[in-house]
Image: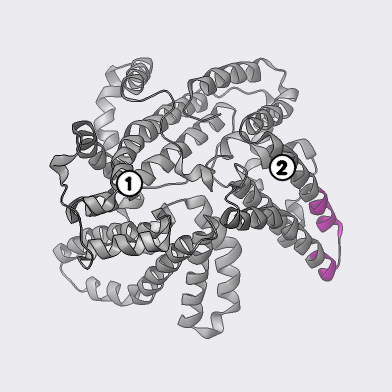
């Protein structure tokens, strides 16, 4: 059941009403039940896999906590990693050779459970002894489709408020606001841009180089609106049920270098890999100096690439990002020292150039992320570079509805992706004089007028 379908929101309204009518002691089991029911609407046959993994990790966590020797702890840790990673690896591999997509949410709940096991290995007190609460953490419905990837020590304390029976109306309202804003980002901005990108990708050889360039730059904005919109919806749904999820985006298009970009993009995944991959590898290679730093960075970004799929295109995307970040990390201190001595006007210009350069590097690396094959990606880069022929169709040959949507939605996506600067100042007088229910009503009218009932597919749902 999609976050963008009307049926889902009818079910959500009923589920939320029942949640607040239930006695407080039943709310956590109820959250687990509706999370499992929601997952079953996507992958009913894989609900058993989720349940078996949850039971196995819970048991291993208890064993890991009770074991006193370091050798025993490492044995249980390795066992837990195998249990959680094996299904993910199997599905990723067979996706390449057989073509079956992995079960919805597999990557997200796998990473959540890995973090739980590793945290217990590092600190015995991280174990959680309530199975129902643990299962609720692992299978929490709003986080299944798009994350964010939440840690157990962030999730479990919030269940105390859920069990207490408190009703935080401000939290519920903020959740509704995030849902409506996320729907508008995804269905109005992202889906409209997707029409243009999909049209060009269907026959790239028939369009001029300028159209191909704009399509390449647009895909990054479309992906942001699609993914960030879905994430906002997920966070908003969680808040309705009293659970606050970690942020996943923070104005990535305002980043002036690639390191800062990854601190702002898919933040929960970046933070996860930093804590459980980058830092351990960096500590083990610190004697290698800058070479160890670059190795750690490239490995981290390569894993991000192949997390999306075991293909050469995703691997190349991660490798290219790793090279960009490695070069940026090695030269950042020198650049900072140089510009520290420069006039303030030059420093401001540096920031603007940095933002533009970062977006361009991200967009061109997305050619590999977007491409079905390496041949498709290489051909697109050749066309953009002028070493392969392009077509004759220009912007004037596009359908009016697609070109109009592009001109309106691309600047809006870039504005939102830059953190929507000045939006609070613009919204303050509106909020002061217009009731929230009127604002939400207008937003829903716009949604119903400008979108279809189901919208385009969610890009990150396949990962």
Residue 426 lies, in percent from the top left, at: 24, 32
The magenta segment: 59-73
Name the main secondary structure of what is drawn in magenta. helix
> Looking at the image, can residue 8 be seen?
yes
For this orientation, the residue located farthest to the bottom is 288
Q: Is residue 452 left or right of residue 84?
A: left
Residues 103 and 128: in front is 103
**Residue appearing at x 31%, y 44% in the figure:** 197
Mark-to-mark CA distance, 2 and 1: 37 Å
**Residue appearing at x 30%, y 34% in the figure:** 424
Residue 373 lies, in percent from the top left, at: 43, 59
> Looking at the image, can residue 119 be seen?
no
Say if mark 2 contacts mark 1, CB within 8 Å. no
The mark closer to the camera, 2 or 1, is 1
- Specify which label sits upstream in the sequence, 2 or 1: 2
Q: Relative to 53, is 429 above or below? A: above
User: Is 109 contained in the magenta span?
Assistant: no
| Mark 2 nearby-residue class (10 Å; few <14, some 14–19, many ≥20) | many
Residues 411 and 461: in front is 461
What kind of element bears circle 1? helix
| Mark 1 nearby-residue class (10 Å; few <14, some 14–19, many ≥20) | few
**Residue appearing at x 59%, y 16% in the figure:** 14
User: Is 61 contained in the magenta span?
Assistant: yes
Q: How many numbered marks does the figure carry?
A: 2
Q: Choose top left, top right, bottom left or bottom right for residue 321.
A: bottom left
Q: Which mark is residue 202?
A: 1
Q: Which mark is residue 50?
A: 2
**Residue appearing at x 36%, y 51% in the figure:** 252
């Amino acid at each position: 059941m999609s976050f963008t379908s009307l049926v889902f929101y009818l079910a959500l309204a009923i589920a939320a009403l029942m949640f607040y009518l239930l006695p407080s002691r039943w709310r956590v089991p109820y959250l687990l039940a509706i999370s499992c029911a929601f997952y079953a609407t996507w992958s009913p046959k894989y609900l058993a896999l989720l349940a078996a993994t949850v039971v196995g990790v819970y048991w291993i966590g208890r064993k890991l906590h009770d074991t006193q020797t370091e050798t025993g702890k490492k044995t249980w840790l390795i066992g837990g990693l195998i249990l959680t990673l094996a299904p993910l690896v199997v599905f990723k591999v067979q996706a390449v050779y057989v073509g079956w997509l992995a079960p919805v949410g597999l990557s997200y709940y796998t990473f959540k459970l890995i973090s739980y096991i590793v945290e217990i290995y590092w600190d015995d007190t991280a174990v959680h002894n309530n199975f129902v609460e643990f299962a609720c953490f692992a299978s929490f419905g709003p986080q299944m489709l798009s994350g964010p990837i939440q840690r157990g020590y962030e999730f479990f304390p919030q269940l105390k408020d859920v069990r207490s029976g408190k009703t935080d109306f401000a939290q519920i309202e903020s959740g509704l606001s995030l849902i409506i804003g996320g729907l508008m980002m995804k269905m109005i901005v992202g889906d409209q841009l997707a029409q243009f990108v999909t049209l060009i990708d269907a026959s790239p050889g028939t369009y001029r180089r300028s159209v191909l360039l704009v399509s390449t730059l647009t895909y990054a904005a479309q992906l942001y609106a699609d993914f960030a919109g879905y994430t906002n919806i997920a966070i908003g749904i969680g808040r309705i049920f009293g659970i606050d999820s970690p942020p996943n985006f923070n104005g990535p298009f305002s980043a002036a270098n690639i390191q800062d970009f990854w601190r702002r993009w898919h933040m929960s995944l970046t933070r996860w890999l930093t804590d459980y991959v980058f830092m351990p590898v960096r500590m083990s290679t610190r004697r290698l100096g800058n070479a160890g730093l670059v190795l750690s960075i490239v490995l981290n970004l390569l894993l991000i690439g192949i997390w999306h799929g075991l293909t050469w295109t995703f691997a190349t995307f991660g490798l290219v990002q790793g090279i960009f970040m490695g070069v940026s990390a090695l030269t950042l201190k020198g650049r900072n020292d140089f510009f520290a001595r420069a006039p303030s006007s030059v420093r401001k210009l540096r920031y603007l150039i940095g933002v533009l350069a970062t977006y361009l590097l991200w967009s061109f690396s997305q050619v590999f992320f977007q491409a079905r094959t390496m041949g498709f990606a290489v051909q697109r880069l050749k066309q953009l570079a002028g070493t392969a022929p392009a077509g004759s169709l220009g912007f004037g040959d596009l359908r009016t509805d697609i070109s109009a949507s592009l001109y309106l939605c691309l600047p809006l996506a870039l504005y939102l992706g830059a953190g929507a600067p000045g939006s609070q100042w613009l919204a303050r007088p509106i909020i002061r004089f217009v009731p929230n229910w009127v604002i939400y009503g207008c937003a829903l009218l716009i949604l119903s007028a400008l979108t279809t009932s189901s919208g385009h597919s969610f890009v990150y749902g396949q990962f």
